[in-house]
Image (cartoon, helix red, strand yellow):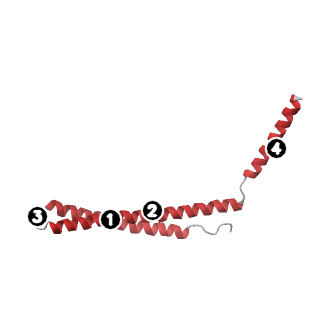
Amino acid sequence: MKTLLLSILLVGSAMLLIGFKCEAQSNDADRDWIDSLAVQYRNAYLKSAISSDQADLDTLVMLVDTLIFDLKQDNENCSRQGRDELIKSIIQYEDARRALVLRKHVYEREMQLARTNFGS
């Protein structure tokens, strides 16, 4: 009796494993769906990166504006250190702006070239 139950259990588990293995293989529709999700998430990531870069650039603009305002307020005591800090901030802003423009073009190009015709 035990051997009969054991053999039935073995046969049943083998059938389940074979069935799960057959169902586990993905078909083209599943792959296309996964690919489309990957493209959507990549595009969302790129848009988020563009927004983050723009926020960083806006922060630098506020820093430069603050330094200019401080120098205008302290006109009679316009120190060399304040002017040097302003010049460094302007250079940093300009470098960040150029980098942002390049990254934005690359990101937008990548989004344009993203594969969108799944299943073709």
The CA distance from mark 2 to mark 3 is 41 Å
User: Which numbered disc flags the more N-terminal residue, 2 or 1?
Assistant: 2
Instruction: Give the amino acid at mark 3.
Output: Asn
The CA distance from mark 1 to mark 3 is 29 Å
Assess whether mark 1 and mark 2 are in contact (beta carbons under 8 angstroms): no
Residue 77: numbered disc: 3
The kind of secondary structure element at disc 2 is helix
The kind of secondary structure element at disc 4 is helix
Say which of marks 3 and 4 sits in front. 3
User: Which numbered disc flags the more N-terminal residue, 2 or 4?
Assistant: 4
The CA distance from mark 3 to mark 4 is 88 Å
Q: Residues within 10 Å of mark 3 (few under 14, many from 20)?
A: few
Residue 12 in the figure: left or right of residue 85: right
User: Which numbered disc flags the more N-terminal residue, 4 or 1?
Assistant: 4
* Residue depicted at 16% across the width and 59% down the height: 81
The image position of residue 95, as x and y in percent, is 32, 65
Instruction: Give the amino acid at mark 1.
Output: Asp
Question: Residue at label 4?
Answer: 15
The image position of residue 50, as x and y in percent, is 44, 65
Question: Residue at label 2?
Answer: 49
Assess whether mark 4 and mark 2 are in contact (beta carbons under 8 angstroms): no
Say which of marks 2 and 3 sits in front. 3
